[in-house]
């Protein structure tokens, strides 16, 4: 390897050293069942570890029942420590580190799943779900911050090396941060300093629980993705506060699931595919009629978050994780060697091919086979996340939509 290439050199996130600088992002797998881990979840993360990644991230684990949006998400509690330990043990046996993303969905759920009226920074109506939302009381806010810390302890018991706190994408911490969802008139609302208070309390609990042996990453927005949300200037202030909190690394992302979902992943959402897998008939046909208005398209291009991420690299001294459109070894080397980010995360490239990292290591010119049709995203909330290239016998209507998107993408 040339002297100036850092991608396949070890690097540390706090007390945890990774064998290289690649991380499987916390892209939701949809592979849980009854909020428990499954063999499919284990098999996927082990395959990524065998494929050469430095660390794999088990996606979205709710810190309590009210944090859950779907049956296929994990509920991080003592009862699932043993099956999670089976995942982390085998990931470690294949040379990779293991992280788990912890969070609370806030207003993006329903009573049947959450066990209560969905809660958020403020009361109101979440049209995306759709559901009525109750604003959290102060004592509940304090309790949820403590549960973030408790989740770190459970993750340690399950053998995870790191946790990734989800503070972006319109989840609960993000709902407090964003003026779009935070309309409170107490010390948790109003100016940005107040809106950061819940995040600060969560981080105090997380860092205390992480101690000296666990790494802490935080996923943050660089922009909420729409005019009435957080913009880069305030997001940098949030990131600086997280740097002050002692977080070991930030994952730089963007978007709001309930307002600008494709700002996160880019490209067109295959509406027919998404509705094909929905079980509720009323929702299926409503989304089929209005889906293109509900889920606006944001153009995909390689390294699509790079311009924004540079602003954060300039403002921060702490380790930063770039995520967004890494599709080749050339992209990866650029992010680490030229742009100065310590790590990079990948989602769709590793779903398309869990061995992508090893193939990049073997070939300086290697490119991902993912063509960003976004079939995987369209089905992940109703089924498991899967690449259409590895899904046989797709229905005729889905194949037609995939071909139309490929043609629009010039493929």
Image (tube, grey):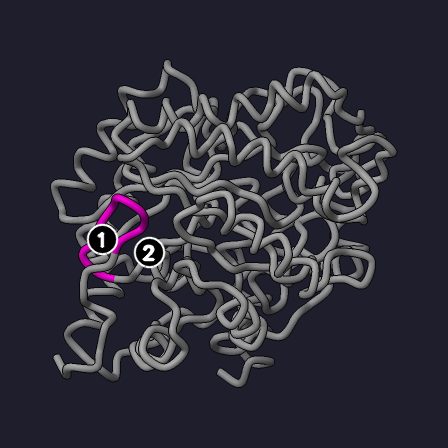
Against 366, residue 245 (above or below) is: above
**From what the image shows, is residue 206 above or below residue 349?**
above
Residue 87 point in image, percent of width and height: 25, 34
- What residue do we see at 40% from left, 28% from top? 152
Please indicate whether residue 27 sits to the left or right of residue 270 in the image: left
| Rendering coords of residue 278 (x, y %) | 63, 41
Q: Position of residue 17 (x, y in %)?
A: 22, 50
| Residue contact between numbered discs 2 and 1, judged by CB atoms under 8 Å | yes
The residue under label 2 is 23
Q: Secondary structure at mark 2?
A: strand
Image quadrant assignment for residue 289: bottom right
**Quick one: 196 or 308, which is closer to the camera?**
196
Question: How many numbered markers are drawn?
Answer: 2
In what quadrant of the picture does the N terminus appear? bottom left
Name the image quarter holding residue 90.
top left
Report the magenta residues as a range.
12-20
Q: Residue at x 38, y 74 (%)?
A: 340
* Of pointers 2 and 1, the one earlier in the residue sequence: 1
């Amino acid at each position: 390897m040339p002297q100036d290439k850092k991608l396949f050199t070890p690097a540390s996130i706090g007390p945890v050293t990774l064998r290289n600088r690649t991380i499987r992002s916390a892209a939701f797998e949809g592979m849980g069942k009854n909020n428990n881990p499954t063999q499919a979840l284990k098999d996927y993360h082990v395959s990524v570890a065998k494929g050469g990644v430095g660390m794999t991230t088990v996606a979205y684990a709710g810190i309590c029942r009210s944090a859950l949006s779907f049956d296929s998400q994990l509920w991080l509690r003592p009862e699932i420590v043993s099956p999670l330990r089976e995942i982390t043990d085998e990931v470690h046996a294949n040379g990779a580190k293991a992280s788990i993303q912890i969070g609370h969905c806030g207003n993006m759920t329903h009573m049947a799943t959450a066990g209560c009226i969905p809660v958020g920074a403020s009361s109101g109506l979440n049209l995306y779900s759709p559901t009525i939302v109750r604003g959290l009381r102060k004592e509940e806010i304090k309790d949820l911050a403590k549960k973030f810390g408790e989740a770190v302890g459970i993750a340690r018991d399950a053998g995870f090396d790191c946790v990734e706190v989800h503070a972006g994408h319109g989840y609960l911490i993000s709902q407090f941060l964003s003026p779009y969802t935070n309309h409170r008139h107490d010390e948790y609302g109003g100016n940005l300093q107040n809106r950061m208070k819940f995040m600060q309390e969560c981080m105090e609990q997380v860092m205390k629980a992480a101690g000296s042996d666990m790494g802490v990453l935080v996923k943050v927005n660089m922009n909420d993705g729409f005019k009435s949300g957080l913009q880069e200037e305030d997001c940098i202030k949030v990131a600086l506060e997280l740097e002050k909190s002692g977080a070991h690394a930030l994952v730089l992302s963007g978007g709001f699931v309930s307002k600008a979902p494709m700002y996160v992943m880019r490209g067109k959402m295959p509406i027919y595919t998404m509705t094909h897998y929905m079980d509720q008939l009323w929702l299926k046909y409503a989304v089929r009629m209005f889906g293109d208005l509900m889920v606006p398209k944001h153009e995909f291009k390689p390294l699509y978050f790079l311009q924004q991420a540079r602003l954060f690299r300039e403002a921060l001294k702490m380790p930063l994780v770039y995520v967004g459109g890494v599709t080749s070894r050339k992209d990866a080397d650029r992010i680490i060697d030229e742009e100065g980010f310590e790590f990079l995360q990948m989602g769709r490239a590793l779903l398309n091919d869990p061995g992508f990292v090893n193939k990049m290591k073997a070939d300086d010119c290697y490119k991902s086979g993912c063509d960003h049709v976004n079939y995987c995203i369209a089905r992940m909330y109703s089924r498991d996340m899967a690449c259409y290239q590895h899904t046989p016998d797709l229905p005729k209507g889905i194949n037609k939509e995939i071909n139309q998107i490929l043609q629009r993408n010039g493929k």
